Structures are given as C-alpha cells and as structure tokens.
Image (tube, coloured by chain):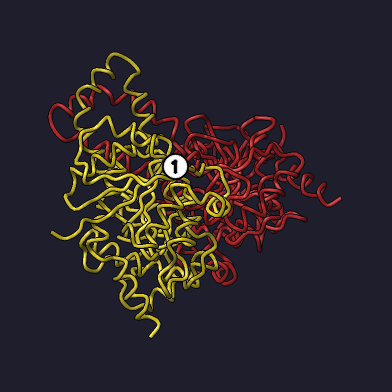
Chain colours: A red, B yellow
C-alpha cells in the first residue's frame, strides 16, 4: 500500500484549541483511510487530550513544539522569535518533506507569514493567495484572495485567477469554471485603479474562463465559480457574508420565540429550515488553502469546530492526492516561456 | 408661514420610473407639511402619471427636461452632453438656488459626477462622499463612503469621518456617535496602506469619537455608529450585506414551501417574522446623501419603490431644515484655521 498523506495539524492554534483540534484529528480518520495526522504542539497537553479517544494509534503521531503564537502577536516577529512554536515547527516540516500539508486554526498572520518565509513560494508565483470555498444559492464559489495580500497589483490578480481555476477544477470537478472580477459596477471601465488595470489582463489571459465584472451583491447568488479580488475587499466581502448570515439567524430565532403562536410555528418549520440552511454551512468545505506555496498550508476559521478541522484535513488529503502544488507549478512555469 | 423646503425629484431615473417616483412624490406630501416637490423630467410623461392621484396642486410642480441619462452611459460624458436631462437640469437648479435638494434613483455615476461638476463641493472639502444609513441588530449605522470615491487618500477619510459625525448627530440625534475604521483586523497596525495611514489621523482628529478598527463581520451587529471606509470596500460591504439578506430571505421562503407541515408552520410564524424583519428594512431610511456639496444630492437605490422615494424626500427636508450643508461648511472651514 502506498504511503498515506501526512497532514501536520496545529494542536495549539484556535479559540477552541486543543480540544476541537484533537477531536477533529480523530474524526478525520473516519473520513478517509489515506491520512496520517501529526499533531504539532505541547506534547503533554496533546497526550492528555488524546487519551479521551479510541483511534488507530498508527495514524496519529505527536511532534513536540513548546511555544505558542498568540493571535495578537505581530506575525513576522512571532515567526522569527518563536522557533519552537507549533506553526514554525509544522511549516518547517513541510519544507523538509516531513509533512505534505499543514492545517491551522491559529493566528492568520503568523500562518501566512510562515507560509511565505518557511514553506516558500512556488518559483514564478509573486504572491501566494488565500482561497476559500463559499456556499451560495447555486452551488459553491471560490473567493481568492480572501486575506493574504493587501495592496495587490494587477499581475498578482491574474495569478490568483489561474491558481483559483486549477484549484476549483480539481476540487469541485468542473472543467472550465467561470472567473468573475469583483467590482463595484459591471461595465469594463468601472471600479478603482486596480480593477481597471486587471480587467484587460484577465480578458486576454489564456486558460481561464473570464466572464467580466461581478458585483458583491451577486456573490451570495453564485454569479461566478471563482471571484478574483484583492485581499482587503475579498476579506471584507467574506466577513460581511458570514456576519450578515449570522445576524439573520439571530433575528429569525428571536422572532420564533416571540409568542406562543410563533413558538408553535417554529416547531413545524424547524426541520425544513435546518435542511435548507445545511447547504449554506461553510464548515463542510474545510479551510482556506494558501495557493502558490511549495506545499499546502490550510487556514481554518479561528473558532473552528472539530467538524471544520476534520474537513480541512480531508481537503488537504484531496489536495495532495491530486498533486495540486505540481499542477500550479506547471501552470505558472508555462507563463514564463 | 416660512417657505417650504424645495426638493427636486428626478422623475425619469430608476428602474421603476416614472411610476414609483411620482407616487413617492405624492406620498411625501403626507409625511411632512414642509415640502414642495419639483418633478424634473419629460413634462407630458409626468403630467399623465400625476393625473392618477389626488394631491395639493400647490405643492407639486413640474420642470420640463427632455433628455434621459441611461444607467450604462459614461457618467461625465452624459453630464456634459445631455444638458437637458433631468439630472443636469435638477442639479443646476440647486446651484442656482431654485431647489434645496435633489433626489434621484437614476445613474449613480451621473448623479455623483453632476454633484461634483454642477452643484460643486463645499470649499475645503476634497472629496464629497456618499453616506448610507444601514439598519443593524442594535440600531442604525452610517457607512461613509459607500460609493462616491475609489482610491481615496487618508486625508479624505478624515473628512468622511467629520462629515459623517455631523450628519449622524443631526439626523439620528446622538451627540457623540462612535466612529470605526473599517479594517480586516482590529489591531492598529492591521490592514492595507490606506487604513494604516488613516488610523493615526483619526486617532488624533478632534471632534470625532474614534473607537478604532471595526471588522466587516461586526457591521451587521452595529459595532459603531459610523463606519469610515474608502468607496470600493464600503460599496462591497453594503452590497454584500444587502445581497446576503436577500439570499437568506429566498432560502427561508423556499424552506417554508417545502411541505404541508412547513407551510402550516409558516402561517404561524409569519407575523412575528415580518415584525422582526421590519427593523432591517432599509427603505425606511430613504436614500444616500452625498455629503460635502453646496446643497443636498440624495441617491436612492436604482430599484427604489415609492416608499423609499418618499422617505428620501422627507430625509431631504430634515437635512435642509437642520442646515446640514452650513454645519459641514463650518466644520471643514474650522480645520483650515
């Protein structure tokens, strides 16, 4: 039997670490046979937590890392100083070929900075970008970049579109996914300096299926398979999407509790609502991969549950099995010829 | 009796023009005694539409304007070429002192370009900004700039904060509204070049109640009274907010129709849900004023209903009664001393 995919999991990062992280690791073994999880973090803490579960001991290991990077720390500084932190140790494992992928719910800044500095970019990739799969009314869309590079340049945006296309094709299985440029207007000449300069480049770019500008209002409807954008806008749209959905759920729940009549009605619509909202459950899609690195770094939400963690591990296995890093490398190399 | 506030209404602009516009004008007379509406557009079309209603003939006039600017037209070009369009005629009326305010549901680009070119900026205002009142879980917030200036500079953002504070104070009646800088992280050093440069300026700015960075996820919760941002992000957040709320409503309605049980439940929760969602109804707040001009230009959604139009007219009356243009002028002048 071939070797299993080795996923290093940050056992210390995230609002619910290490509990949800370790539960997610155990859970992931049930989702796929082809994974080996290496829990990176404080050995004693991890061991104590692991004792709660029954699992295949051959498929979960521990790599000790004594330090923890907190969310508030300046990322580059933290990466440089805390050499024995779970993030630094795990990212060095990828570089050394000791792991195929790294999943973390910890400090986004530190995970990304480490991705650039320790794992390193694929030759020819100018900026690695964070892509996230978002559920929409008509399927799944990828938002790239949703948080890695602010102040991106037009050439970077073209690479985001290429890397996003490869990722979407392989992970979702659609041969020629549509690419929309996030913009505050649909006409070609609309937008800011960045979108105006990016539009013609995307239009002429071979190997992507560019459909023009897409307004943020259309994002929840799934107007394109891939939304290309710079990180400030991408992150703002993603977070507004999540925040608004959360606020609406609060409102709905509040209105159900208003009186006896509404409480009774709520009992009757509950199952149907639950089923409907399941399609909008982002945790099904795991984490956000950082595309363009020499190996996979995958970031989940800071408050990830075990379910999101286990799906991010599964996603990392799929990514590795499909040789996505090599495929991105080939695509980027070919543009330099 | 003092003269009434004169509001010029673009009878030709908007997806539902002239029907909803004219109905909105008639409706507005019931909302306040202190308004005189001047319908600007093709006289014959307006006259035919007006015949459907009973109203005080002294309080609605018509100003003929034969041309119509379409949404797709390049804004500055349209303003320059179509001199007899409703937008150009109405904005010139403001400049000439023949109207106090202009409400339009037409081409945002043309309304804004005309605002700068025909109405003109208050001396000292570097960029006029579009502010919009958004309902949130904890009240009402103002997003400024939500669409007028892309690629704004830090100094512009400070003026947005000042103008927004005056507008919010007068319209909502809160003496010292909180100001948050929209950013993709809460710490001072987070964000892009623009937010990093803007943060210290807002921190030192007298006369505003700056509370630091606010992440877009917190916008629906009403984390600040005023959200200061550059237009690309502001518009993206606003449109994502609206789009997500719309998508969720579609999902909810769909789930209610799923089967007999859910249909029955829907009947029971309907009233309570309706009441709850009323607080999130943006049309209650009228349109988005362009702050910083020598007179009020107010933009509604393109698909505005008569209700939104009538509320925008009422809002324009409040704006004028409270001498907001003068108050903004005084605040901006004082910074030059």
Helix, strand or loop at label 1? It is helix
Taking the view exactly as shown, the residue that stands out farthest to the right is A337
Left or right: residue B193 versus residue A325 is left
Expressed as whole percent of the image width and height from the top left, the position of residue A115 reads 63, 58
Q: Nearer the viewer, residue B286 or A106?
A: B286
The residue under the point 40% across, 38% down is: B303
User: Quarter of the image containing the N terminus of chain A?
Assistant: top right
Left or right: residue B237 versus residue A252 is right
Q: Nearer the viewer, residue A137 or A189?
A: A189
Instruction: Please identify the quarter of the rendering in which residue A96 is found.
Output: bottom right
Residue A39 in view in this figure: no
In this rendering, the count of numbered labels is 1
Taking the view exactly as shown, the residue that stands out farthest to the top is B260
Expressed as whole percent of the image width and height from the top left, the position of residue B278 reads 24, 39
Q: Nearer the viewer, residue B216 or A293?
A: B216
Given the image, what chain letter belongs to the residue carrying mark 1?
A
Instruction: Please identify the quarter of the rendering in which residue A259 is found.
Output: top left
Disc 1 residue crowd, few under 14, some 14–19, many 20+, Cα 10 Å: many
With respect to residue A209, does B209 lie above or below? below
The residue under the point 34% across, 64% down is: B164
Expressed as whole percent of the image width and height from the top left, the position of residue B60 reads 26, 44
Expressed as whole percent of the image width and height from the top left, the position of residue B302 reads 42, 41
Residue A1 in view in this figure: yes
| Residue bearing the label numbered 1 | A306
């Amino acid at each position: 039997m071939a070797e299993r995919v080795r996923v290093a999991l940050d056992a210390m990062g995230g609002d619910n670490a290490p509990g949800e992280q370790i539960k997610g690791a155990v859970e992931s073994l049930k989702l796929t046979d082809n994974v080996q999880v290496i829990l990176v973090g404080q050995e004693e803490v991890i061991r104590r937590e692991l004792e709660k579960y029954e699992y295949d001991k051959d498929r979960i290991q521990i790599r000790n890392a004594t330090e923890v990077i907190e969310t508030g720390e300046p990322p580059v500084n933290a990466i440089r100083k805390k050499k024995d932190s779970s993030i630094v140790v795990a990212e060095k494992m990828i570089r050394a070929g000791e792991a195929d992928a790294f999943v973390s719910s910890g400090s986004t800044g530190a995970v990304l900075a480490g991705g650039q500095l320790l794992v390193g970019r694929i030759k020819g990739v100018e900026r690695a970008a964070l892509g996230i799969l978002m559920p929409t009314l008509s399927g799944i869309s990828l938002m790239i970049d949703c948080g890695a590079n602010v102040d991106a340049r037009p050439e970077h945006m073209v690479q985001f579109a290429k890397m996003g296309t490869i990722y979407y094709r392989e992970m979702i299985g659609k041969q020629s996914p549509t690419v929309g440029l996030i913009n505050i207007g649909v006409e070609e000449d609309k937008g800011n300096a960045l979108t105006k300069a990016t539009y013609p480049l995307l239009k002429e770019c071979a190997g992507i299926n560019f459909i023009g500008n897409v307004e943020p209002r259309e994002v929840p409807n799934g107007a394109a398979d891939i939304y290309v954008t710079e990180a400030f806008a991408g992150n703002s749209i993603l977070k507004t999407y999540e925040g608004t959905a959360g606020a609406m759920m609060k409102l709905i729940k509040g209105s159900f509790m208003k009186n006896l009549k509404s409480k009774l009605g709520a009992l009757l619509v509950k199952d149907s609502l639950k089923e409907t909202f399941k399609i909008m459950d982002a945790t099904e899609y795991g984490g956000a991969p950082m595309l363009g690195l020499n190996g996979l770094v995958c970031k989940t939400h800071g408050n990830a549950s075990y379910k999101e963690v286990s799906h991010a591990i599964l996603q990392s296995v799929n990514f590795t099995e499909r040789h996505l890093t090599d495929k991105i490398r080939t695509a980027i190399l070919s543009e330099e010829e």
